[in-house]
Image (cartoon, rainbow, N blue to C red):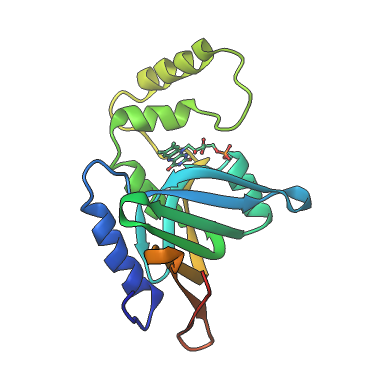
Amino acid sequence: MKEHDTPFRLFEEWYQDALALPGANPAAMVLATVGEKGTPSTRIVLLKEWDENGFVFFTNYGSRKAGEIDANPQASLLFFWDQLGKQVRVEGSAKRIPAEQSRHYFQSRPLESQWGAWASRQSQGLPDRSVLEGRFSAFQKKYPAQVPLPDFWGGYRLNPHRFEFWESAAHRLHHRRVFERQAQGWSSHLLYP
Ligand SMILES: Cc1cc2nc3c(=O)[nH]c(=O)nc-3n(C[C@H](O)[C@H](O)[C@H](O)COP(=O)(O)O)c2cc1C
């Protein structure tokens, strides 16, 4: 593992390697949130944008994950790139991005995805699939060309305060490097595997 002064440079290097893998979906990341009474829950979301301010994904603001983040912004992300033998853990706090930024991304999506976002009451009980299909058709008719951004849909940005980069090595002597945010910049140290 090379030395880097910020975790973002190392993430960029590893992410570029992951993007070059055939057939993989390197943007798929596990998002962990904390529910009432401290119960954790996880699911996959797609990384859509990232920079030194954080990692952005998009979702339904009425979903379980959104409710948990809005009540407790502490969250973590996990990337696992099997073919590279690499894992990245990211911990931080997440908050909604401005609607204008969400609108920009929403309108870049295929129309079917935009109608789908309107149709889904993500994480709520669905009595029957035909109800979902009916809602999709209704929104398709209502917004045949220009689909507005639903007020219940948009992005979150997770602003990291800790990273851990894990890379497999011979004899199970794997590399682990932690970066922690300091008042000025980042500190870094190794962990036993
Ligand atoms: C490969 C993959 C990508 C996904 N990407 C997203 C995503 O970007 N946003 C999202 O809200 N759900 C995404 N999902 C669905 C979530 O895993 C999850 O089922 C959904 O968001 C509801 O989660 P919740 O009930 O915990 O809020 C994805 C699922 C998979 C398997």
Q: Position of residue 57 (x, y in %)?
A: 43, 50
Q: Which residue sits at x=34%, y=74%?
A: 1
Q: Position of residue 182 (x, y in %)?
A: 53, 85
Q: Is residue 169 visible?
A: no
Residue ranking furthest to the right:
37
Foreground: 122 or 149? Answer: 122
Q: Position of residue 130 (x, y in %)?
A: 50, 10
Quadrant hosting residue 110: top left
Residue ranking furthest to the bottom:
184
Quadrant hosting residue 169: bottom left
Foreground: 68 or 88? Answer: 88
Residue 94, above or below 53: above
Q: Is residue 34 visible?
A: yes
Q: Which residue sits at x=55%, y=66%?
A: 92
Q: Answer with left or right where residue 60 lies relative to residue 71.
A: left
Q: Answer with left or right where residue 32 lies relative to residue 174.
A: right
Numbered marks: total: 0
Q: Which residue sits at x=36%, y=50%?
A: 82
Residue 30, above or below 164: above
